[in-house]
Amino acid sequence: MEKKNIDWSNLGFGYLQTDYSYVSNYRDGAWDEGGLTEDHTVTLNECAGVLQYAQTVFEGLKAYTTDDGHIVTFRPDLNDERLAASAARLEIPVLPKGRFLEAVTKVVAANAAYVPPYGSGATLYVRPYIFGSNAVIGVKPADEYQFRILCTPVGPYFKGGAKPITIRVSDFDRAAPHGTGNIKAGLNYAMSLHAIVTAHREGYDENLYLDPGTRTKVEETGGANFLFITKDNKVVTPKSDSILPSITRRSLMHVAQEYLGLQVEQREVYLDEVKDFAECGLCGTAAVISPVGKIVDHGREICFPSGMDEMGPVTKKLYDTLTGIQMGRIEAPEGWIHVIA
């Protein structure tokens, strides 16, 4: 199959329209069969539930061209589970069993010409989302919903290599206790926009959010989970009921233990102990791991021994192993790779 005439090596991380999207509607208490569409516009009533009360949830995953030429996605079953949990939390009807994977497979296959070639560093980003679509003026769940998937080819998150970033401890809370921090709701990301804009204005790349109850424990950033490496090479990630269950983080913990033979631990991580770690990274779909070189806590600098020039050695092994699995260079655990073409 002939690929589109795109300069893959110069793609940014932005939106480039592809040929097809996927759409399904929920009306009269049931989801329709859904299917592909070439119409990339959404027309809504001015009083639609998503516009009035932010009733929307979403996911993010990627399609890759592997070393042997197949088009695959990585652990889409976990995206399916997380979307269902997010939908249930916001009183959005859950998709029929099997629909998510069917829809992802259809839309990626239809846009195969936009899946970047192996070795280009680029991938096809896949964004499934559901939103309340009918008019709602009283504060209540919508009666009708639309499930859509858009695709867009994106370049590597890091151009020129993954250089460690500097982040700050935020004065804002990302989520409320017993709130929606553990689901992928659009409203969570809206809450983070002011914090990230002000962080960038002050010269920082990201925010470190503390737990909203005591503000003593590390939670996550606006869009990624934390991963720490101790000086004796143990991999530690924060544990909290208001952290989004990152698929990348869970995969990295498995890779650390089963592929690299490292000890792993998910537990509460106190801000006071961060200075004692050897390495730090942010993990998520976009970059896999973004290395952190420095955390600034209201003027107090916490500098990691791994430095500001490159990924720490353990973080690099984790990154190389997981991306090797995703790209087909390393054998994957059973069920991790979903072959589309």
Image (tube, rainbow, N blue to C red):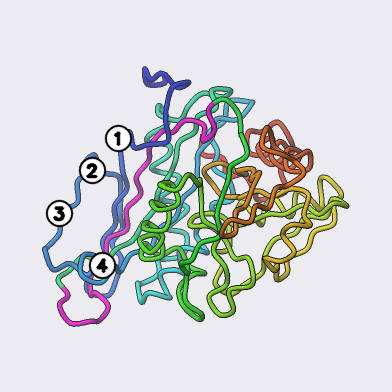
Separation of marks 3 and 1 at Cα, in angstroms: 17 Å
Q: Residues within 10 Å of mark 1 (few under 14, many from 20)?
A: few
**What amino acid is found at the position of numbered circle 3 in the picture?**
Thr
User: Disc 3 vs disc 1: Cβ atoms closer than 8 Å?
Assistant: no
Residue for badge 4: 132
Task: Give the quarter of the figure containing the N terminus.
Answer: top left
Q: Is residue 263 magenta?
A: no
Asked whether the beta carbons under mark 2 and mark 1 sit within 8 Å of each other, the answer is: yes
Q: Residues within 10 Å of mark 3 (few under 14, many from 20)?
A: few
Residue receiving disc 3: 43
Q: Residues within 10 Å of mark 4 (few under 14, many from 20)?
A: many
Whichever of callouts 4 and 1 sits on the residue coming sooner in the sequence is 1
Q: Closer to the N terminus: mark 3 or mark 1?
A: 1
> Magenta part of the protein: which range?
136-159
**Earlier residue among tags 2 and 1:** 1
Task: Kindly identify the amino acid type of the residue bearing the numbered disc 4.
Answer: Gly
3D distance between C-alphas at marks 3 and 2: 10 Å
Q: Pick whichever of labels 4 and 2 is earlier in the sequence.
A: 2
Percent coordinates x, y for residue 171 in the rendering: 48, 66
Q: Secondary structure at mark 4?
A: strand
The numbered mark at residue 40 is: 2
* CA distance for labels 3 and 4: 12 Å
Q: Does the CB distance between marks 4 and 1 fall below 8 Å?
A: no
* Image quadrant where residue 93 sits: bottom left
Q: Which residue is mark 1?
A: 17
Would you say 185 lies left or right of 236 here? left
| Location of residue 189 by image quarter | bottom left
Quadrant for residue 130, please give it.
Answer: bottom left
Question: Magenta stretch containing residue 145, yes or no?
Answer: yes
